[in-house]
Amino acid sequence: MKQQIVVSGIGGQGVLFLTRVIAQVAVDRGIPVLTSESHGMAQRGGTVLSTLKVGNFAAPLIRTGQADVALLLFEANLAVHRALVKDDGELLINSDREGEGDRIDGSGIARKMGNAVLSNLVLLGRAVSKNALFCTEEECIAAIGKLAPAKFIEQNLQAFRIGVQSLQQ
Amino acid sequence: MNKELMMGNDAIARGLLEAGCQVAAAYPGTPSTEILQSVINRKDQAVNPLHIEWSVNEKIAFEVALAASYTGKRSVAVMKQVGLNVAADPFMRTAYLGVKGGMLTVVADDPGPHSSQNEQDTRLFCLQGRVPVLDPSSPAEAKAMIGPAYQLSEKYEMNIVLRPTTRVCHSRQSVALAEPVKLDRIAAFVPDTGRWCATPAFLPGLHRSLNAKLEQIAQEPHWQPRLLVGDESRPRVALVASGIAHANLVDLLEELGLSGTIDLYQVLMPYPLNPQFVEHLQQDYDRLLVVEETYPVIELQLAHPGACGKQTGAVPREGELTPDVLYQALAAFLGLDTPPTMAAPGRGQRPSLCPGCPHRAAFYSIKKTFPDGIFPSDIGCYTLGMNLDAVHTVHCMGACISQGAGFHQAYKQDGGRVPTVVVTIGDSTFFHAGVPALINAVLQDARIIVVILDNATAAMTGGQPVPHMGSTADGRKTKIIAIEPLVKAAGVDFIESCDPYQHDRFENLLKKADAHTRSEDGGVAVLISRHGCLMDPQVRKMQEAPAVIITEDCIGCGQCVEDFECPALSMDEENGIARVDPDRCHGCGTCIPVCPAQAIVRKEEL
């Protein structure tokens, strides 16, 4: 099994946490995983990009046109990071507007829950329900339970589940 | 074996603890910061007594670790690539004098660069300094290098450099844990004046012994280049790579179906390079592709007539060697179909000071008060004051005060009105390298305003403690080194402090400071801009945050968006007026005075 995943957003949107959850699922399943993350200046509201390579790889960066899936928390990043994704790759986008890819207003949902940053897990839930990622729902729940601070676990799981169920509604 | 998903920097930290490191000193800087942070987080896993410090700067971190090694204990100094410039003085001499207990210097390079003022290559620095340097290609490999590196350091009594790059530091991987070793070492410093105080008389001998050691280290079996042998379908051609560039090359060859078709060497220790390896490449290969970040360190040492690399222009001389860049170079070298050149993607959203950031309020007032001022600034979040046109120079740690002084001297000698020079420097940067510069400015009577942006933390790197907060790296209480008495002792007569959220008072103080710099018996003026960093949840909790809204009075001039540049403010494309993003606004209200139509108000005041 091999999968190359892009997670894109702007600093402060929880791109790093989302990246860690997906990577943790791979570790829990015993599959090799490599990630690359943006730290430093870019985290101050600038465009940030994480890449994940699941399976037998040596390096974390993804070449143009090689990503199988992209999770975009910030729609405007589509222009910057679309090229990394295969033409027939899965695009999941946090947006309240019409356009390319599968879209869900994660920020709107998260805002109603009282914390806009939860859009990251809404989008993850959506991706999992569409079988876009190698992860199952149960595996993600276990990984979120491991990585989220105790007092936020319930809220995080709620956001994730809303994302999972969003297609049925 | 027990495995954990670890960031490269965390893996390095765990490796240090497993190898019995007892003194760890660092100054924060991206991409190295999380190494010491992880040592702190993991301190309970240490089986030997452990001193951890955020030193005031990298030179100090290096010297603390160095002396600890003189006692026979294992130590480490951690910094980013430009931090090594600050530590260069002790670093260069250490090559000659050596160490006793194992000493590593972990220097994280930033090809790209992603978060640095240049993309200098520590391996080249090591070549100049005659210091062995290791170049890991992954988090797991970086960790695995640490134990053997300490052994190498102790065998030859040499400081050894581990040089990860951003893509190793900030990469996560499943990494195996090992039991930390218990060393039971007691500090035992043995004076040896001919060595630890070496005067010029002793140095030729020490230099000779250094060169002899380097020749031996180059032969050490553990650190020889590794060969992934090809199937001879491409005879007398090889690829030579090190660090993350090697890992990228491995994946690229796999994707192109070329794995195992061509000899691929991974250089683990780019300096000193084994001369027999160099000779072997010269004799057995006609053509080589050398890929390394960021300077041609291996390529220069190979001196191979058939080498293609940065020297020949076959590999770009600047920037990161991403898989796309490598693909172009590899295709040209092997005569493959040339991959389509990708249009460079846009840079995306530029970073900004956070909503509610006190620096923004300070910068706005500075620019407003002195529209024609000269604004040298420095390294930190507040570099982003350039977005508000309130930062004109950013050079290196502490440079703003001396540059401000230099501007003043150059203008003053022409006669006429000297422009107001307002320097902005963060609290952590002020302690790091600003203090000597301030003393110098006072001594040379440079009439400048120094605004110390005191947000009570080293914010850019994630909130490390600063000397005036009285807390050590591992959270113990320590003496508070307050800024005001330090500034006073430096000879400054004008010292004021103010919360920049109070626009009017802040601007009044700026005018007073300007008057002080221009009065006959005046001098340097220091204004401390004091408000906690909004990244600190405590600060956010403590300050009132009534919602800020835009009323119908908005005339759509865009001044708040253009001049104040808060990420929570934007122009509504449809109706052409400003809007507040409720997800991002902290309700600080510092944007209220910016609006010429008084259309920004607190909700409760309606």
Image (cartoon, coloured by chain):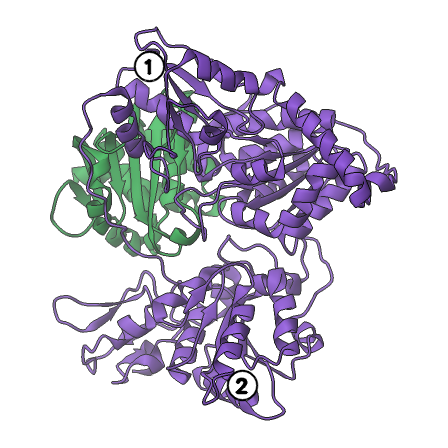
Chain colours: A green, B purple
Q: Which amino acid does label 1 sit on?
A: Ser
Left or right of B563 on screen, residue B400: right
> Does label 2 lie on the same chain as label 1?
yes
B7 on left or right of A168: right
| Residue pictured at 47% horizontal, 67% vertical | B377
User: Residue B326 lies in what quarter of the image?
Assistant: top left
Element marked by disc 1 = loop
In the displayed image of the protein, which residue is found farthest to the bottom? Answer: B520
Q: Is mark 2 on a helix, strand or loop?
A: helix
Residue B278's place in the image compared with B40, above or below, is: above
**Is mark 1 in CB contact (under 8 Å) with mark 2?**
no
Q: For the C terminus of chain A, which image quadrant? A: top left
Q: Dot 2, crowdedness within 10 Å: few (<14), some or many (≥20)?
A: many
In the depicted view, which residue is nearer to us: B106 or B93?
B93
Residue B253 in the image: state x and y as whole percent. Answer: 31, 20
Q: Residues within 10 Å of mark 1 (few under 14, many from 20)?
A: some
Point 63% across, 18% down: residue: B220
Residue A26 position, x and y percent, is 39, 26
Q: Position of residue A76 (x, y in %)?
A: 21, 51
Left or right of B591? Residue A127 is left
Q: Which mark is residue B513?
A: 2
Which quadrant is home to the N terminus of chain A? top left
- Name the chain letter of the residue that bears numbered label 1: B
- Residue B299 showing in the rendered view: yes
- Please state the chain letter of the residue tagged with numbered disc 2 in the rendered image: B
Q: What residue type is labelled 2?
A: Ala
The residue under label 1 is B259
Image position of B387 with respect to B465: above or below: below
Mark toward the start of the polypeptide (1 vs 2): 1
Residue A35 in percent (x, y) is at 39, 33
Q: Nearer the viewer, residue B143 or B189?
A: B189
Give the vertical position of B221 relative to B370 (above or below). above
